[in-house]
Amino acid sequence: MIEVLKRPVAAVIASVVLLTSLLGAMVFERVQHLRNGREIVLAIRPVDPRDLFKGDYVRLGYDIASPKPDLLTAYNNRRDLPVFVLIEQGATDPAWTVVAVTEQWPVTVAANQVVLTAKANYRTLQYGIERYYIPEGTGPKLEDQARTGKLAAIVAINSKGKAAIKGLMLDGKKIYDEPLL
Amino acid sequence: MFRYRSRLETDLARWQAAGWVTPGHATAIRAEVAARGVGFGLSTVLATLAAVLIGFAAMSFVAANWQAMSKLARLAVIFAAMWALFGAGYGLMSRQMPRLADAALLAATAVFGAGIMLIAQMYHMDGHPPDAVWLWGIGTLAVGLLTRSNPVLAAALVLFVVWSWMEMMSGARWFGTALTPSHIHWSFLPYWAAVAVGVAVTRWRHGLHLLALALTQWIIASGFMVGRGDSLGGHSAVLIVGLALMATSIFAGEIIDRWRQISGALLNYGMIIAFAGALALQFIVDKSGAHTVWMGLIALAGILGTLTWAWRTDNRPAMWIAYGCFAIEVFSLYLKKVGTLLGTSGFFLATGLMVAALAYAAYRLHESRTTASGVAS
């Protein structure tokens, strides 16, 4: 009970500082990640075009989420297994493809390669960038655009291999370009 | 509050009639109660509801994802609301209105939760969803411990229970018609203990019940987290834990009650846990029904034994829980059937006659005791 507090001011100030810094740390970490992370563009394909939009966010299905089955044979029956995914950009093709899936950080990473952290779930990989929140009521418009054009996500990768969404692209043009703050 | 006042009114009339209380005393008592009552009952309830509404307002504000405001402006709204509610909490504390201060702090922690969701949404975070609830719980727990606010501690416990369920279900998969849970969520226990420390510091009696309920549901749920939810070992462990708690209450009750009057509550929660385990063993683990008869008999005997003990120790909640267990057990047996419907009928007739014989024995015992005491006095 509050009446037993000796110094209520200190308790309230400590509470305010703690909660504010927890939220502040979340924002700071994310802004640092988006600002300093390596930027790549990943192709997206709708998992199910009719059921693409649920409420106020879009489910994004990445090409790199379902690599060739033989790369995942070791993890077929695992769920939520943390893995490192080595992806590579071809010399002529700007698309990124999965080269290897390992439980350890890959030994050699070439300049045209990036390491991503993911969770292996049966035959798919989840990168933690599968949701894109959109303003209320703008779902149908984006859905139409997704059906006619080619959608892609601009993703920032930090030094630990964690991915974060920076924006969405349609036919090479940014459609959601968001400031960091 | 209203009920207390109306009861006091009839009591005062009776005491006045008996000559224990003068009319002047009665007026003074009424005035004192009225003065204490103002701003307590109804205003506390309304303030707590207001806190809930403010929390939902903050969450809907987040869900709207209103892009007319910049990210920074949206963050500023959340921070300003949180700081203002903390400020209000402090103001109410220093004006000696602790219940209203509690409500303001509760609202502040709700806005903190909305802030977590807002940041996750603004930056399209799609990590492990239980983590967000965990962080919310940590912040709420810290505020509860710092300000010694009981409602905030209760909110932290609720958040940890939700987090624990999300963690338990996050690895669950459907196999055919059966949900396969993933694992026992041991990490719940340290957070439960942290809330318990807070409740111990504020010496909050109702908080003890909340803690017991949270632990009870965790123990029962953990029984389902082993194997595919129908494991003999998992539900047996739940049954044993429940029986152990009941045994502690029955055999060490006097020692416990010398410290704190909790042996009755210990029996009640133990009974709920033990019965949940027994029910799962009878109707989930034993799919074929090969063991229905003897397990059903033991369960009914256990319930009747507990009922007798509850009656002897004058533990009313335990009696009600035992009635509830009896009803659920009998209905489950009826649905499961002992072999054929005719067999079920025979089972119920036999147990019915046995219980009737027990009732007669209890009646004779009661009668001989009252006549014996009547002669002695």
Image: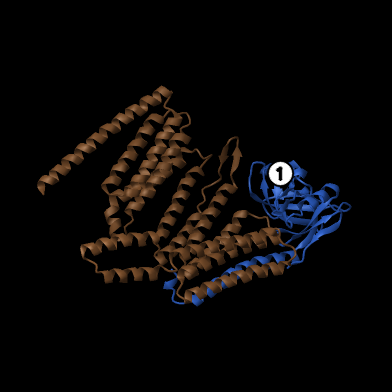
Chain colours: A blue, B brown
Q: Residue at x 28, y 42 (%)?
A: B308
In the rendered structure, the answer to whether residue A60 lies left or right of residue B61 reads right
Taking the image as drawn, is residue B208 in sight?
Answer: yes
Q: Chain of mark 1?
A: A
Tell me the amino acid under the disc marked 1: Leu
Of B193 and B108, the residue lying toward us: B108
In the rendered structure, the answer to whether residue A76 lies left or right of residue B281 reads right
Q: Position of residue B324 (x, y in %)?
A: 39, 42
Of B147 and A94, the residue lying toward us: B147
Residue holding disc 1: A72
Of A3 and A109, the residue lying toward us: A3
Q: Position of residue B254 (x, y in %)?
A: 27, 54
Taking the image as drawn, is residue A14 in sight?
Answer: no
The quadrant the N terminus of chain B occupies is bottom left
**Rendered position, A102 above or below B368:** below
Numbered marks: total: 1
Q: Residues within 10 Å of mark 1 (few under 14, many from 20)?
A: many
Which element carries disc 1, helix, strand or loop? loop
Of B377 and A24, the residue lying toward us: B377
Q: Position of residue A98 (x, y in %)?
A: 77, 49
In the rendered structure, the answer to whether residue B121 lies left or right of residue B43 reads right
Q: Residue at x 36, y 24 (%)?
A: B346
**Rendered position, B81 above or below B224:** below
